[in-house]
Image (cartoon, coloured by chain):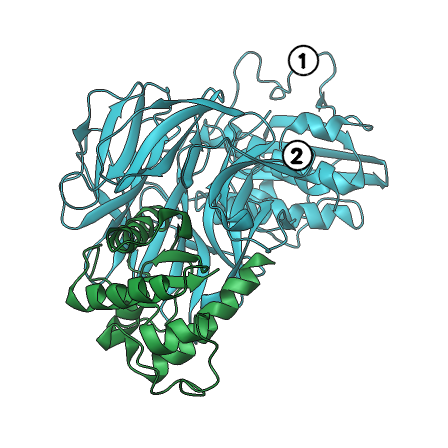
Amino acid sequence: MNLTRLLLARRSLLAGAAVSAVPLLAGSPKAQGIGGGNQQPEITVDRARTAPIPIAIPSFAGIPLGAEMTGVITNNLGRSGLFRPISPAAPAGGDGDTPNFGSWKALGAQALVTGRAEGGGSNVRVEFRLWDVLPGQQIQGTAYTTTSANWRRIAHIISDVIYERLLGEKGYFDTRIAYVAGSGPRDRRVKRLAIMDQDGESNHFLTDGTWLALTPRFHPTRDQIVFMSFQNNRPRVYTFDLGTNTQRVLGEYDGMTFAPRFSPDGNTIIMSVARGNGSEIIAVGLGGGPERRLTTGGAIDTSPCYSSDGTQIVFNSDRGGDQQLYVMDASGGGVRRISFGRGRYATPVWSPRGDLIAFTRLTGGTFAIGVMRPDGSGERILSESFSVEGPTFAPNGRVLMFYRENPARDRSGGGYSSRLVSIDITGFNERAVNTATDASDPAWSPLLA
Amino acid sequence: MKFKLIGIFTAVALLGACADKAATSGAATGSGATSGTAGVTPGSQQDLVANVGDRVFYSLDSSSLDGDARSTLNRQASWLARYPQSSIQVAGNCDERGTTEYNLALGQRRANAARDYLLARGTSSARITSVSYGKERPTALGSDEQAYAQNRNATTSVR
């Protein structure tokens, strides 16, 4: 296993061969539009109400990486639902590096991406330019130097640059998904911790399947995951270090620990510990150590998640009789219920933007993924079926991923499946996420610089 | 591969349970076990499954012990008194109609309910461990009410 490919931070790409973002325009620390003066050309679109941006992405020059990278970029932008990629056979160029904008206008393209990937092995140079077709202006021009093994990362980074320049907010393409890969019959299910790129590529299994692994979550800045393992038949929360490929039990709290999650500042882990007739929420340091008890009282309090500013915690509890969502201060006080709709509510996650809480809602026949404001108002159901569970936000807060199970058709479990799904928080653009095996428990990584 | 061991136990238990309507009676009578009671080592897991009943069942989102469950646990307590060297693990399980994390806690609650009953009937706490598998280890593989009823259980394994 190539460990360097598991690391999340872009600085990890720098080891050995530098990834340098070189402005193509001489003397400019950042790429600027040609002839734009101080004005940054930017296409701003209200995406809630308008059609996807038509963007032409002719194949990058350079064999074989040019076409491969173009494919990754096209797939990223298309899957976001916010772009409509046009991949014509038409040549990109007019004279030299300046495209023939007339032909792109004729195809209906508003934006154009051109590029080339040259070299190989330890010395690959990727250059790309983003153009605003109508005025015929360059919006961005950047070159990256890296090893050929990192070509996918570079394609994702370019996708994020395009997304941000055209939509005015950060992208989420250079990110990973940690998840649980499932295989085998359900009564002897093998569940392995796994990690892959957000588009389903570059899959790695992190555990060998000897023990059940559940509910991974990413550290906000380090190359670290916290998850639950049944190692040695003692279900406990573990941390997994992606740099060294090692896992370590997170303390000993006299009982099963589960449902872990990092604080936004990365210094604390909150989780449930089974005690008495229920489970309490406790906060501990990254190495375990002394606990701070945040809830008590015999109810099942679980699935805690910090608000994006770290001041509050949302969790689910059956203290009122059945599972509902509650918010409390990060210190454990001021508990108030926020879910009041029909059914039971579970697995709350706070958006990185702070504006929404996503959840799983359980009613008699179906499960649903929905969002509500942190005060419980404005509930919207985004997706509903026999079984959906466990939403996780993309780092820009625009997209959710969760998993969907199809029921067994027969008594031997035939027909059962578990797959990852992504959906825009508007409820549109639901897409299957490809995985080699059955998959559940997705966790979206942060976007690291 | 400790899970393999558990898996084998569960498989054995399932054979017994399916064959003799354990899901509805709450107790395995042994009538449908592969070899009946003959040839079963006294004090073994097979003995527990065939002659005592290795599991109790719960209703939806509940950890209450009904009459059937209490009779099964009474038999388990007597059986444990007869084989004082044996130790057991009580594993709590849930159906698939709940969320992973909540079900881990609910499974623990179910395991605790069965364990506490055995303790009250005189079994030493040193002989009992409990664990929750949440919805991760169903014995019935279908997605229907009958399967869910079988999967809401606390299952006793000889260790």
Res. A48 image quadrant: top left
A350 sits left or right of A375 in the view: right
Is A4 placed above or below A205 here?
above
Label 2–label 1 contact, CB within 8 A: no
Q: Which residue is mark 2?
A: A7
Q: Position of residue A156 (x, y in %)?
A: 61, 39
Chain of the residue on which disc 1 is drawn? A
The residue lying at 73 percent from left, 11 percent from top is A27
Co-location on one chain, circles 2 and 1: yes
* In the foreground, A80 or A356: A356
* In the foreground, A426 or A94: A426
Q: Which residue is mark 1?
A: A29
* In the foreground, A3 or A267: A267
Q: Nearer the viewer, mark 2 or mark 1?
A: 2
Give the amino acid at mark 2.
Leu
Q: Which one is earlier in the sequence, the residue at label 2 or at label 1?
A: 2
Res. A240 image quadrant: top right
Chain A rendering hue: cyan
The residue lying at 67 percent from left, 13 percent from top is A29
**Circle 1 residues within 10 Å: few <14, some 14–19, many ≥20:** few
B96 sits left or right of A9 in the view: left
Identify the chain drawn in green.
B
Callout 2: SS: loop
Give the amino acid at mark 1.
Pro
Callout 1: SS: loop
The residue lying at 53 percent from left, 19 percent from top is A40
